[in-house]
Every structure is written in structure tokens, then in C-alpha cells.
Amino acid sequence: MKVKDPMKLQPKELEKIQLYKLKKTLKRAKNSKFYHKRIDVYNISTLDDIKKFDFTTKQDLRDNAPFGFLAVPLREVSRYHESFGTTGIPTPSWFTQQDFEACVEQISRCAVNFNDKDIVLIRFPYAISVPAHKFHAAAERRGACVIPVSSRTPISPHSRVIHLMRKLNVSILCSISLEAILLAETSELMGYNPHEDFESLRAICVTGDLCPKSRMERISKLWDVDVHATYGATEVGNMAVTCTNKELHCLSDHFLFEVVDPVTGEWVDEGEVGELVVTTLYRRAMPLIRYKTGDMVKLKSYENCSCNWTHPIIEILGRKQERILFTDKEILLGELMNEIAKLPEDVVDNLWMGIIQNDKILIKAESKKPGISTEHFSKALSEKFNLPIELVLVEKGTLLNRKKLLKVDPIIKSRYITDWRSDINKPRTLDEILIGYHTFIKGDAND
């Protein structure tokens, strides 16, 4: 069921498409070992009938990895990826070529709008995880030139990325939000001004870490360019993209979204906080039914945005596991990040850390004005969350040693022969040869 502009589908049209795809998804899922006996032949007549099915959890994915959720023969599979495993054992993700093409199309909907004049630098890791590959393909298919830098390695330290951005006139940077901040810091250490010395840069696209709207605005001011975001998970794909107003809109023709109470599993009202549950409507290799993402979110009506997209707006508030628990209350990480990013930029810089103590939550933040009083800001944060919060300012460099951003690690290359006639160290093992080689090439790596 193809439509001209899927982001502008009217609600009734969208529901019709969702119901059609849900029925097909259930049939596909039944081919997997995990769902084979769990999915009976239900008469699905409305989207509300999704409640008839049990939740699928991350633990289910781990317990049945790697093949338990595979719903097609291996000959139809084109690629395999895994999550980073930041909150536990990595979870699997199988793709047919058609699945991957759909993921690329999801990224392409983002209002960053890759085009044939763009030079796009990809700063996501290419190893095992999926974002770099999706962004790479999405940019190429719009005619853009791609620089596949990957994440920080001895080959691609922060300083080299800055050199590449300048000499190649990079127009779009794709990275996690923290990396966009650290690259701005690196450029300043190298004597450049992120506002003035990257004239070709027109946008930054972030994904992979928590980035509330206020944090996006901070990054936008750092570089003086538009910042867009996408939201997804390795297990299911890319679930939301930003519109021209920088609001994250759900891709509801590719997913069925539910927001539930994390304890009872019951649906919460629109605008209330709950755990995001998704059913994939496009996946063939690994369809997931009512998958509990572990992310706490709010869903709001598309009518709250003037972009003309008709898909709900989603606000990401962080993972359940990252909740800050204090006495009988809790703070979601996204809520805290949002409020800290709203504080004046000349008072609170972009790098901070939270420390939970017995009597309070201490926020240590780097600042250009570390000596000023923070009583007013501490009080505002405490009142916002109804918890004792103290903001303490420290000098820039206290929380992060900026020299490490300029550090260039030596590159290890193959070497098997040592000449004792000229090598005064006379290495006796391969380890010793390679360690000596580190010293030898270190100067070249810094060039």
C-alpha cells in the first residue's frame, strides 16, 4: 500500500493501513520459533485487538537469541546487527533487503533532507550497530557524497574529523548529540570558531543518545546550524523523525505505537508518561509484536504542530533503567536534561554530571562563571522536581580533560620482521615489535 506522502495521511487512512499491515505482520511473526505457539489465529477487526497479545520483552529477545525471532529462511536474510548492550546483553536484529530499504526510507523522511549537493560525514560506529549504515544509505540515495568516518578510532580522532569537515566542506554531520558537542569543543581547541569557520555546514542530524528539544537547541547555537533528530532502536528500526519544526513525529505507517503503564501494562491517556510499546508493521525477517522498548515517553496529537504531518508527536524521556530514584520519588533522565539545558548558557555549559547523595542530588556543571551564586538555579530545579537538588559550578576542564580530545592514538599495522643489527631494543616477541612500532609511527599519526 504505497501513498504519495505517507507523513500526511489522514487519521482514518492511517488506521486502515495500520490494520492491513498488522494482519500481515501477525501471519509473518507466526513463522518464527518464538511466536509460533504464542500467536493463535485471532479475528483482528480493530487496532484495539492488539491487546489480545502478550508483551514481548528485551529478555525474550536475549533468551531466544540469535535465531528464535527469525521469521524467514536464512537465504532471505541480507544482514544482521546487534544493539550496543548498554543496558544489558546485546539484542539481535535480522533484516531482509526489503527491511533495510524500509529503514533507509524511514531516515529519508527526516526534514534534514539529504540532497545531491550535500557532503555528509557519518560519525556513528559502523561495527555491528545499524545507524551508520542506514544514514549512509539514506544520504547516498538522495545523491549525497558520504564520508564514512565512523566513531572515534586511532584512524579517526576528533582532530581529524575537524580537519575533514573543513577541507571537504562538509554540509551535514551525523552523530550522537554528545559527539556534536565534543567536536565543537575540539574545533575551539584547534583555534577554530564553530560559528564562523564551517561555512558549508548546514545541519547536524543526531540519534543514538537522549537529546531533548532544549539540548538540540543548544547544539544548534554551538554550531549555528539546524539540528534534526531521529529516534529508533536496533531491534525495531527508526520510529520517529523531526519535522521542519524540530518535533519528533512517529512513523505510524511502519509501527503501531502504544504507551502503557510500566507496572499494570494498561494504556495511559494521551500526553501522560508511560513505557513505549511498538509493533513492527514493515519487518519481514524479525517482526516484533507489542515489544516493550523500555523507553519512557509521551505521545501528543499531531495537531500540536504546524508542519502538516499527521502522525503523533513523541517526546522521549529516557529509559526506565536510567531513572533517578531518590526517597519515594523519581526523575526521568530526559526531564532533568531538558531543565538543565534551559539554564543560561553562560552559567551552565554543555557538560555536567549528577551525583546522588544521601540528602540531595548534586549537579556538577562546567561553567564560564564558576564563581557566581547558584542558589536561584538550585531552588528552581528543586521546586521543579520536588526534590533537594544543588547545582555546583566548576571551571571548564574539571569534568572533562579537553587535551584528550586532541589525543591521537598510534595506529597498529602488521609487522613481523625485526632487524637486531639496527634495533637497539632487540625485541624478542611480536608484542615488543608492535609496541616499538607504536613509537615509530606516532609522529605520522599526528600529521
Image (cartoon, rainbow, N blue to C red):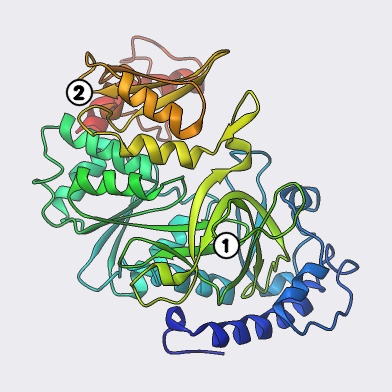
Residue at 63% in and 80% down: 18
Q: Secondary structure at mark 2?
A: loop
Q: Classify mark 2: residues with Cα within 10 Å, few (<14), some (14-19) or many (20+).
A: some
Q: Classify mark 1: residues with Cα within 10 Å, few (<14), some (14-19) or many (20+).
A: few
Where residue 29 sits, quadrant-wise, is bottom right
Seen from this angle, which residue lies furthest top?
424
Seen from this angle, which residue lies furthest left?
196
Where residue 325 sits, quadrant-wise, is top right
Compared with 100, 416 (above or below) is above
Earlier along the polypeptide chain: callout 2 or callout 1? 1
Residue 164 in picture, x, y percent from top left: 21, 48
Viewport quadrant of the N terminus: bottom right
Which disc number belongs to residue 66?
none
Residue 262 in picture, x, y percent from top left: 70, 48
Disc 2, disc 1: CB below 8 Å? no
Viewport quadrant of the C terminus: top left
Residue at 67% in and 50% down: 91
Compared with 291, 214 (above or below) is above
Residue at 33% in and 26% down: 377
Residue labelled with disc 1:
270
Depth check, mark 2 against mark 1: the one in front is 1
Q: Is residue 318 visible?
A: yes
- Disc 1 marks which amino acid? Glu
- Disc 2 marks which amino acid? Lys
Residue labelled with disc 2:
368
Q: Secondary structure at mark 1?
A: loop
Q: Spatial distance from mark 2 to mark 1, Cα to Cα?
A: 40 Å
Residue at 34% in and 9% down: 424
